[in-house]
Image: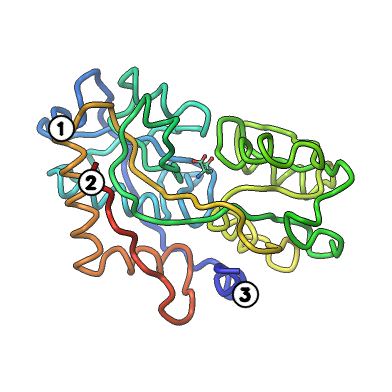
Amino acid sequence: MRFSHALRLGIGAVAIAVAATGCGGGNDAGDQAKEGKLTIGIKFDQPGLSIRDANGSFRGYDVEVAKYVAGRLGVRPEDITFKEAPSAQRETMIMNGEVDFVVGTYSITEGRKEKVDFAGPYFVAGQALLVQMANTDITGVESLTGNRKVCSVKGSTPAQNIKDNYAKDIQLLELDTYSQCVDKLRSGAVEAVTTDDIILAGYAGLAPGELKLVGATFSVEKYGIGLKKGDRDTREKINDAIEQMVIDGSWQRAFESTIGPLGGSTLTPPIIDRY
Ligand code: GLU
């Protein structure tokens, strides 16, 4: 499994304080950036990727990507307002202008592209399973037989994949956030949590010796930056920013300082889809 190194080594997170100021608006992201401020939708509870500390600061890989892109659009970190964008609300929040864009483990899909546009991808993940360390019967998605209880998040691609392809073997519990699912796993109310490997690695890293990822990945999740449909200009600027982030080494550094060292150089930046 791709993130086994990250799991073994734990999650080396770097605290980066981002002041929350400013407010959202109905204009497109380009107009907002011209005014020197942006409202960006992210997750608040995904360790390694995007987590909100008790003091209100944000850190993680998605936060670093968001800050870098904002910077290339001329917006300083202190002029970014981060807003929580739960999986099921991302398209709506973009469409109604609550956020200028979303950097939140957000897979590019054809269905979502009917409502929003995507810059990127900036990362490629894959659906996996998280179980308790002591569990020996769940070894991968093919071992999930006999109506097992599995948790995932409403409006996410992993939940949809289970409903479309594994419904007869799995009893799916859908909650609002992955941290709620992880609580259910810890208490024994469900036997597994399913979503992208990178997200699960973050939770496992927080609970070493308690939770583990199992099996091979069983989907391809290309993370994009979601923005208003039709805003081609901003999409191209964000694409340029992601490319620049890779070229100048910030992309690799952001990953290594947040998700944790992968050991070796298996981390390959994805090719931007300029549609
Ligand atoms: N990448 C998947 C998705 O966009 C799962 C992660 C998430 O829910 O944020 O639905």
Residue 20 lies, in percent from the top left, at: 32, 37
Q: In this view, does 153 lie to the left or right of 122?
A: right
Q: The residue tagged with tag 1: helix, strand or loop?
A: helix
Q: Is mark 1 within 8 Å of ligand 1?
A: no
How has the structure been colored for display?
Answer: rainbow
Graded by Cα atoms within 10 Å as few (under 14), some (14 to 19) or many (20 or more), the crowding at tag 3 reads: some
State the CA–CA distance, disc 3 to disc 2: 36 Å
Compared with 11, 94 (above or below) is above
Mark carried by residue 8: 3
Q: Nearer the viewer, residue 33 or 159?
A: 159
Compare marks 1 and 2 and give the one earlier in the sequence: 1
Graded by Cα atoms within 10 Å as few (under 14), some (14 to 19) or many (20 or more), the crowding at tag 1 reads: many
Q: Name the residue under label 1.
A: 30
Whether residues under marks 3 and 2 lie with C-beta atoms below 8 angstroms apart, the answer is no
Q: Does the residue labelled 2 lie within 8 Å of ligand 1?
A: no
Q: Which image quarter is the N terminus in?
A: bottom right
Compare marks 3 and 1 and give the one earlier in the sequence: 3
Mark carried by residue 274: 2
- Of all residues, the one furthest to the right in this rendering is 146
Q: Nearer the viewer, residue 239 or 162?
A: 162
Question: What residue appears at the point 79 percent right and 58 percent down from the top-left corner?
Answer: 132
Compared with 213, 79 (above or below) is above
Residue 81 lies, in percent from the top left, at: 31, 35
